[in-house]
Each structure stands twice: as C-alpha cells, then as structure tokens.
Amino acid sequence: MNQTIKTGYYGDWGGAFIPEVLYETFRELNIAFKEAKADPAFRQEYLSLMGTYSCRPTPLTHAENLSSHFGGAQFYIKREDLNHTGAHKANNVMGQGLLVKRMGKKRVIAETGAGQHGVATATMAAKMGFDCTIYMGEEDIMRQRPNVFWMEKMGATVVSVTSGTKTLKDAINEAFRDWVTNMEDTHYVLGTVCGPHPFPEMVAWFQSIIGQEARKQILNQFGKLPSRVYACVGGGSNAMGIFQGFLQDRTVELIGVEAGGKGINSGHHASRLTGKDASAGVAQGYKTMFLQNDDGQMRDTHSVAAGLDYVGVSPILADLWQKGLVRFSSATDKEVMEALDLTMKREGLIPALESSHAFVQAFKEAGELGSDEALIINMSGRGDKDIFTIAHAFDDPSWKEFIRKKGAEYAA
Amino acid sequence: MQLNDHIKKALAAGDNKILLMTHIVLGYPSLEANRQVIKQMVDNGVDLIEMQIPFSEPMADGPVIVKANQDALKNGTTVRECLDFAKEITSEHDIPFLFMTYYNILFKYGVENFFQKSKEIGITGFIIPDLPPEEGEEFFSLTDKYDIAPIMIYAPTSTDERMKELAKFGRGFIYCVARKGVTGKHTDFDTEFNDYMQRCRKSTDLPLAVGFGISRREDVDYLRGRADIAVIGTKTINLVKEQGVDAVGPFIAGLR
C-alpha cells in the first residue's frame, strides 16, 4: 500500500494511543497477527472457511437496468450482501476468529453500530465456541432491534450502552473498558479499519478479499478495469476492502461516500473528510480526522444509517484522502432513500442504508462516463435488516397497520 | 523539579508516612462545588490534588467518572474555564496540583501551548492515561523545559522490563494502577498485589502512588510501607453526589 513512517502510521495518521494496562495485550496481538499474516496456511484456512461457511467469492452483478436508466457507465455491483450474515463484516470477523483460536483465547467482545458487526461476531463465536459480549449504543438498539434479537438467539450477551451519545463511539469505549479488565482470556474483535494499531492494518488485510475478487471479476466479465469504484465510508472497512483491489491502478478513480445526514452544512451529519466540521485529533486509541469542537470534545453525529454514524474515520483512508488517492463525497438521508427506492424497483436489490450512500454518488456521476466504461459499487450489506427504519422513512401505511396489529396482539 | 522536591520533603516529615492524593473532575457538579471540595480537601491534609479536565471519550475511566465527565461537559465546561479555575486554585492553596486528562485535550490546544499555560498557572504534573511514551515524542521533549512532571503509569500487566522503560520517562512519582479494569471498582489487596508492588519498587527510585479502588482508612493503612501516596478518586465524587460537599472534609480527615 503506502509507505509507513512509524509503526502503525499512515502518513500523519494512526498510531496506538492505548492505556498502559493494554500494552502487553497489544504486544502479543501484534506478534500473533504478524505470524498469521506471514503463514500461507493461515490465509488458506481463511479462504477455505469463507468459501464453505460464507458465500465467497461473492458475485459481481451487472446491473443492466440501472445502466440503461442513467444512460452512461455500465453498473457493476459487488454483492457483499450475499456474504453470510448479510454484509462484508463477516470477512473481518471470521479472520479475527481464526486469530483468536491461534492465540488460545476463549471469549470475544465487540462494538456494533448498525448491528451487522455484532451479528457477524455472535455468529463467529457460536461457530467457533467462544463466549461473546456485544456492546451497542442504546440509540442503535432502538434502530436495529432485529439484529439484537439474532445476536441474543445465537448466544451472545448484548449490553446496552447508555453513556455519551449512545451510539457507535460509546460502544467502542465500553468495549475497551471490558477489555482492560478481561484481556487475559478475551479478544476485542474491532469491527472496522480504525482504533489503535494493528487493528486498521488487520481489518484492511481481512477485507482486502473484496477488492481481490472484484478486480478479477470485472476483468473477466467486462474485459477491462472500471473507471470508478464507489463505497460508503463509516469507519471505512468495506471501502478499504474494495479499494485495495484497485489502488495500484491509477486509471481507476476511487470514491468514498460519507453520511451527509440532514446536509453537510446542517451540523447533523457524519462527514469527516467532506465538509469543514472535522479536524485532526486523537481519540479511541488513534489519530485521525474527528468531528470535534475547538476544545477537542467529540460532536454529536447524525445519519439515517447507524453504521455510518461515527465521529472518526480510518487513518488509512485519511492518508489516502490527504494524498489525493481517494476522492470523498457525501450523500444526504433523503438522497439515500431515493437511491434505495430506485435500486429496489429497477434491480430487485435491497442495499443496506449504509451501502445506499455509495449508490447515490454513482447515480450522480454515471452520466459523466461512456457506455463503454464501467463503474463498480460496493454493496456492503443487505437492507432487510433496516426494515423498521426504511418502512418508517417511506411512511408505509400497510406496514404501520401491521405493527399496530402486532402491538395489540402482544398487549392483549 | 518542584514536584519531586515537594514529595520528598513531605515523605521525610514523619515515619511510615503516606501521602494522600485526591481526584476531582473539573466542572462536576460545578466549578463552585469543585472550589469548596478542594478547600475541604486541603484543610483536612490532602497532599496533592489531580484535577481532571473533562473529555467526551474518557476511555480508561469507570462509570462514575465517565458520568462526571459527561455532566461537566453538559454543563458547558470548557478547557479555557478549567485553566482559569486552576490558576485561581493554585494561587490560593499551597500544595501541588496536577492535571489529569486525555491526550486530545493537549493535542487540540497545541501541546507546547498547553505546557506553557500550565506552567504559568502553577501546575506541577500531568497524568495522561492514553499517551504511552511511544506516542509522546513531542510531549516528553517538553517536560523538562517547562518543569512539569510527566506521571508515568504502571499496571499489573506491565512486565519488569516495561516498568524500567517507563521509569526512564517518569518524574515526580509513578502512578501504579492497583488492578486491571477501569476506575471506581473495589480492589482486593492480596499476595498478587504485594508481588506487584514489590516489582514496582524494584523498577524505580521514584515514589509510588497507588490508585483504583481505594476508599477506606483500612486501604490507606494497608498501603503504608508498600506505597508512598494513596490516591482517592471515585469515592469522593460519589460522596459529593450522595451527601454533598460538606461530607468531604470529615471523610478525608478519617483516612489517616
């Protein structure tokens, strides 16, 4: 990728700002990861697990109807929604699960925003026989109740986090508080390419499977490289996953799409690299661009998509942004609902609210490209988990009637 | 080093002496309450006070101090106000005051500016739990210049080798975290703890402070001979919340 200045740094960003009590744990984790990464048998074990337990390689779908609708580039969609548990999160979680086995630990903990990472971790824990605790903001539990149900059914304990803004960043803080107490038998399965080193590198490595597949698939199906690749960016793991397949190709433009919420100038968004509300800072164990005030206190963020509702962004992406290797844009909640509606109607695909952000930007730009060019959208997850949020946003009368009836049934 | 000298002198003042350091979160429940609590602490013999500048992501703290940080910020407490308040306090009371906070507060203020300002208002040491020496190049290059003691933290998980490495950076005293976990939970003082304290002692000539879970006279007595400074954190925060400011004085007086 890019040259690092100091261990765990990507240009100005990254590092490991960790309390002393975790120093030894990180030292061991660094060694375990380094050994696993250098061991071809480990990658083979990982690929075999992903091919038999999950649905890898996930397909690359030519979206012909969207292509003709916009009359420009050929749309190709990388189908991470078809991964087991319905999102790219499984790629990272299964890899870390194998690492936990190598380290001989018995318990895993994780934070979750949208719940996808929590569900993936609970799934991995069930399959590999680990105890599992998931930290989730109270507000996110309200937004993503179905995922809470599945995590609990798979045997995980879901802890509702009521401190701070009650969202993803607070769940991360709580997970760290658990870890500083139980590091001896517990591994913290961080869900994205953020946090202290080696997490950004580790998660990016496991997620690179998306880009490796996508590059092969587009060459196979389209005969040449795409002109542009779009991915939504919360912490940045699905974006890093697919971008890594094309970083060496300077003809491929990489576009990260952040949560524009109620608008980039509204103060209610989660856009770190687009807009003017973020600045360099150190929190949650690493240095990146954070949405914070002049004192260094983190701001409230907003997005219709819980998985993008986060104050920081991957240090690797901050570096690629600074070097001009990835372009960033943002999509508002309203644009996201429109893009989702169109994608369902034209292609019969239900992207997650997070993934729909990437669709928005591709829709805006498809007309700039010729029909002999291709673009790829990373559909990082499926949207059926969002049924309550989506049905609410569409103000769907028949759904509301159903909920009312169900409520009456339980009240009786 | 003013903090070193002060601590040595205080420890030399009696046999089997143990000093008390207390912790307050600035702006919680209010700066006015902080003012009264500090006066009670100093009047009742506290030797050092760490003042926490609130941060929105206090990763190493337990629920009580997390809530105190959050409420202080909700009250609108700013870094500027904390600095002004500290200036007033240090000129009023003749004991060492330290700042405890997270690195982002310094980073956003400008690390050297923060040192300069802190020196100017009479702060003698910094406790920054999320800044290991590996990430503190700029920070540790400034501690001697401004004569502000960087308080290094030991944990039970620190190896002997690691302790020696940390001690090289330390001034004033070493803060020994009594157990794994976050602030505010009870600590069992057992053989494991004794072994740990012996390892700490062997690794450095600096005085040893012990914090995390110390809330009673028995705890302080137990630490005599094992440590030089007992740190009371969460306990007084709870006390102020449950019984009001006036409960602090008698509590402190009863610890030794």
Image (cartoon, coloured by chain):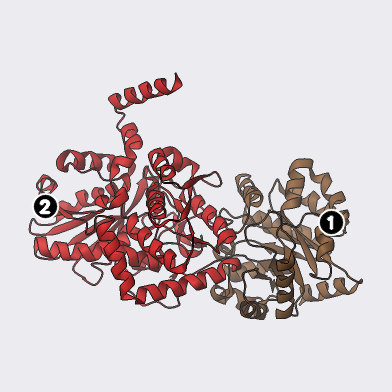
As helix, strand or loop, the secondary structure at mark 2 comes to loop
Give residue B221's position: percent from left, percent from top. Answer: 85, 62
Question: Which of the 4 image quarters holds residue B149?
Answer: bottom right
Residue A72 vs residue B206: left or right?
A: left
**Considering the numbered disc 1 on the image, is that residue within a helix, a strand or a loop?**
helix
- Please name whichever residue, A164 or A183, is drawn nearer the observer in this view of the structure: A183
Find the distance from the CA under tag 1 to the CA under tag 2. 77 Å
Q: Looking at the image, is A11 positioned above or below residue B183?
A: below
Judge whether B11 appears above or below B190 on screen: below
Question: Looking at the image, which residue sits at the far front?
Answer: A129
Q: Which residue is mark 1?
A: B217
Which amino acid type is marked by label 2? Gly
Q: Residue A281: horizontal and vertical position, in percent?
A: 50, 62
User: Which residue is at the front of the view, A25 or A261?
Assistant: A25
Is A343 on the left or on the right of B93, as rendered?
left
Task: Write down the chain letter for disc 1.
Answer: B
Q: Quadrant of residue A212?
A: bottom left
Q: Measured from the top left, where is residue B151 in percent x and y? A: 68, 71
Nearer to us of marks 1 and 2 is 1
The answer to whether residue A240 of the structure is visible from this angle is yes
Where is residue B220 shown, x and y percent of the image?
A: 82, 61
Give the vertical position of A155 relative to A58 (above or below): above
Residue at the location (32% across, 62% down)?
A: A207
In which quadrant is the N terminus of chain A drawn? bottom left
Q: Quadrant of the C terminus of chain A?
A: top left
Shown colour of chain A: red
Q: Crowding at label 2, few (<14), some or many (≥20) Cα neighbours within 10 Å?
A: many
Q: Residue at x 81, y 76 (%)?
A: B5
Q: Which residue is mark 2?
A: A72
Query: Residue B204 sits in which quadrant?
Result: bottom right
Chain letter for the part of the structure drawn in brown: B
